[in-house]
Image (cartoon, rainbow, N blue to C red):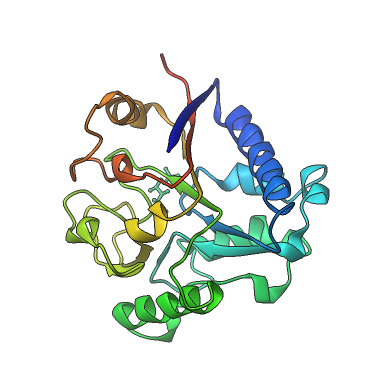
Amino acid sequence: MKTEVRRFPDLSELSKAAAEFITNLINTTLEDKDFFSLVLSGGNTPRRLYEILAAAPLADRVPWSRVHLFWGDERCVAQDHPDSNFKMANELLISKVALPQDNVHRIAVETGPPDEVARAYEQVLKRFFGGGSPNFDLVLLGMGKDGHTASLFPKDSVLLEQVKNVAAVYPTAASVAVPRITITFPAINRAACAMFLVSGKDKHAVFKAIIGRADRAGPTYPAALVEPREKLIWFVEDFD
Ligand code: 6PG
């Protein structure tokens, strides 16, 4: 796995570069494949990125009919709740581009208790990837100031999951402390590429600890455990 760090003066420049990277990766990948599987992240950081991807010129460069969207995690709230990761992506991106509805693989949190929803999403992934394990083309990730990513929080036993690709978690320290559905490291690390968007001075020390650590293991910072098959890129706001 190759790791690359790209530094930017602010979130706006970071988002533009990330959108350009994603657009180029989609087009390069689709030279050899029929579809591109993209895992979206939640939270606030990717908002500007989604807006840029949804507007000209980049929106016109993406063959949306061959892009399939998934979520790295979702809060167990109604689809129209302000904390819904789907709501945010739908408003800023999905509703603005010519993406077929069948290409949107939402985590349907309203269909049952969290554990059942996790099992159902596992089946969504299994069906999409022809009965096998998911191997996403790109997983987009954010990071919290505690080093969590997706809804994989420090010291949670889900960090040790080796088999399931999707899990229900009940974080108490999260900014949005509701039950959540998250993809796990088996799903993240089988992806070809993962990219972090990290903005905010309050995350910079954790970012430097992760990049600087030799071992990169340990449940201290779950983001340190992201190791996709081919490429890991950090898009970070620079505070050095
Ligand atoms: C979520 C996210 C989560 C997020 C980080 C960073 O659903 O909360 O998937 O992992 O990426 O918490 O959030 P911000 O971008 O809002 O700082």
Image quadrant of residue 8? top right
Image quarter of the C terminus: top left
Say if 213 sits above or below 88 in the image.
above
Say if 50 sits above or below 84 in the image.
above
Task: In this rendered view, identify the residue nearer to me: 200 or 99.
Answer: 99
Q: In this view, does 179 lie to the left or right of 239?
A: left
Task: In this rendered view, identify the residue nearer to me: 181 or 90.
Answer: 181
Residue 74 x/y as whole percent: 43, 65
Residue drawn at (28%, 68%) of the image: 163
Residue 231 x/y as whole percent: 49, 39
Residue 129 x/y as whole percent: 53, 72
Q: Is residue 57 among the parts visible in the rendering?
A: yes
Q: In this view, does 230 lie to the left or right of 113?
A: right
Residue drawn at (44%, 47%) of the image: 229
Residue 20 x/y as whole percent: 69, 37
Image quadrant of residue 180? bottom left
Say if 8 sits above or below 44 in the image.
above
Residue drawn at (33%, 56%) of the image: 185
Q: Is residue 179 among the parts visible in the rendering?
A: no
Tell which residue pokes out farthest to the top in this image.
Answer: 240
Task: In this rendered view, identify the residue nearer to me: 62 or 193.
Answer: 193
